[in-house]
Image (cartoon, rainbow, N blue to C red):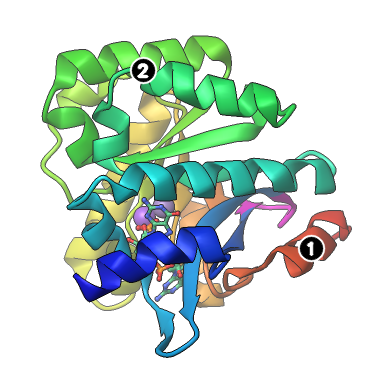
């Protein structure tokens, strides 16, 4: 309850910020986009992890205010980058809200942004609970030009067969599989399967949590289209992201 009250204040008091983590092309290492990740630094308790406060916000109406804050601030960065997209995480609760599409489009218009430069990250949980409605929503977003990424892929219970029904642009392989790749045959097999599936369906495949050069190399060989992780950059403050966005490799 404490955190909940604090979060309400945080939105008003400017205690929130966004960090941006580069997503790079498999070969060129050119930055194609940045994932926006919310940060909260309280005056009295220091940093609180989004792994703690996002779920708390989801239990209350606050996820909508928080989500709007995140989207508006993510969109505001686009004008400072030469052409990269911003990838924004949406909670299943936001995604299932009525007028989700209209409300995003409204904010994108007000920011003077192009939907083509906005990637919407949703998890399997968001789309498989009410697959019919989700398919419709994704289709509308896609028509407007947004990119759609299925986040944490492999950790949910999606039927691979059903993936076809959704208007997606890419799959993001959950970092737990990348982490296990060098140690367990199972993780490596899952990573390879997801990459094959994505390619067979004409989707991009972003590998998350890439920390070592040997992981990156194995992922390139396996055919991942994009890489993201500490090897390239941790999530950085907006000013640093602007500098990275301008950098030529
Ligand atoms: O950035 P970090 O690894 O601390 O994030 C922890 C968790 O919080 C991750 O699961 C991440 O997806 C989630 N998270 C981070 N930023 C956002 C955000 O802007 N919106 C939502 N809905 N979740 C976020
Ligand atoms: O749930 P989601 O995939 O959106 O969460 C992304 C989170 O993963 C971010 O909060 C980010 O801090 C974290 N992250 C990004 N790159 C790496 C990495 O290379 N290793 C680890 N351990 N975590 C990472
Ligand atoms: Mn994500
Ligand atoms: Na993820």
Q: Is residue 165 visible?
A: no
Q: Quadrant of residue 225?
A: top right
Q: CA distance from mark 1 to mark 2?
A: 35 Å
For the point 55% across and 54% down, the residue is 36
Q: Which mark is residue 244?
A: 1
236 over 134 or under it: above or below: below
Magenta highlight: main SS: loop
- Look at the image and tell me in which quarter the N terminus lies: bottom left
Q: Which tag, 1 or 2, sits closer to the chain's start?
A: 2
- Look at the image and tell me in which quarter the C terminus lies: bottom right
Judge from the rendering whether residue 189 lies leftward or rightward of residue 205; answer left or right: left
Label 1 secondary element:
helix
For the point 49% across and 78% down, the residue is 41
Q: Is mark 1 within 8 Å of ligand 2?
A: no
User: Residue 68 location in percent, x, y?
Assistant: 48, 41
Judge from the rendering whether residue 35 lies leftward or rightward of residue 22; answer left or right: left
Q: Is residue 60 visible?
A: yes
Label 2 secondary element:
loop
User: Residue 127 location in percent, x, y?
Assistant: 22, 29
For the point 55% across and 12% down, the residue is 144
224 over 204 or under it: above or below: below
To which residue does mark 2 refer?
Answer: 99
Q: Is mark 2 within 8 Å of ligand 1?
A: no
User: Magenta part of the protein: which range?
Assistant: 24-31
Count of number-bearing discs:
2
217 over 97 or under it: above or below: below
Q: Is residue 27 magenta?
A: yes
């Amino acid at each position: 309850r404490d955190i909940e009250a604090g979060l309400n204040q945080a939105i008003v008091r400017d205690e929130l910020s966004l960090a941006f983590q580069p997503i790079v092309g498999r070969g060129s290492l050119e930055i194609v986009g940045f994932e926006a990740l919310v940060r909260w630094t309280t005056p009295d308790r220091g940093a609180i992890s989004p792994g703690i406060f996002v779920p708390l916000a989801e239990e209350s109406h606050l996820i909508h205010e928080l989500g709007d804050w995140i989207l508006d601030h993510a969109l505001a960065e686009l004008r400072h980058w030469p052409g990269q997209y911003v990838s924004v995480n949406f909670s299943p609760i936001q995604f299932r809200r009525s007028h989700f599409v209209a409300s995003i489009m409204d904010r994108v218009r007000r920011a003077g942004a192009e939907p083509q430069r906005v990637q919407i990250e949703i998890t399997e949980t968001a789309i498989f609970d009410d697959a019919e409605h989700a398919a419709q929503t994704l289709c509308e977003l896609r028509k407007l030009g947004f990119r759609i990424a299925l986040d944490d892929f492999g950790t949910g219970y999606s039927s691979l067969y059903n993936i076809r029904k959704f208007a997606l642009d890419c799959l993001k392989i959950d970092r737990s599989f990348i982490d296990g790749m060098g140690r367990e045959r199972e993780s490596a097999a899952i990573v390879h399967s997801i990459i094959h599936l994505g390619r067979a369906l004409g989707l991009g495949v972003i590998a998350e949590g890439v920390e070592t050069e040997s992981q990156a190399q194995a992922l390139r060989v396996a055919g991942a289209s994009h890489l993201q992780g500490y090897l390239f950059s941790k999530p950085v403050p907006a000013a640093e992201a602007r500098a990275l966005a301008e950098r030529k490799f």
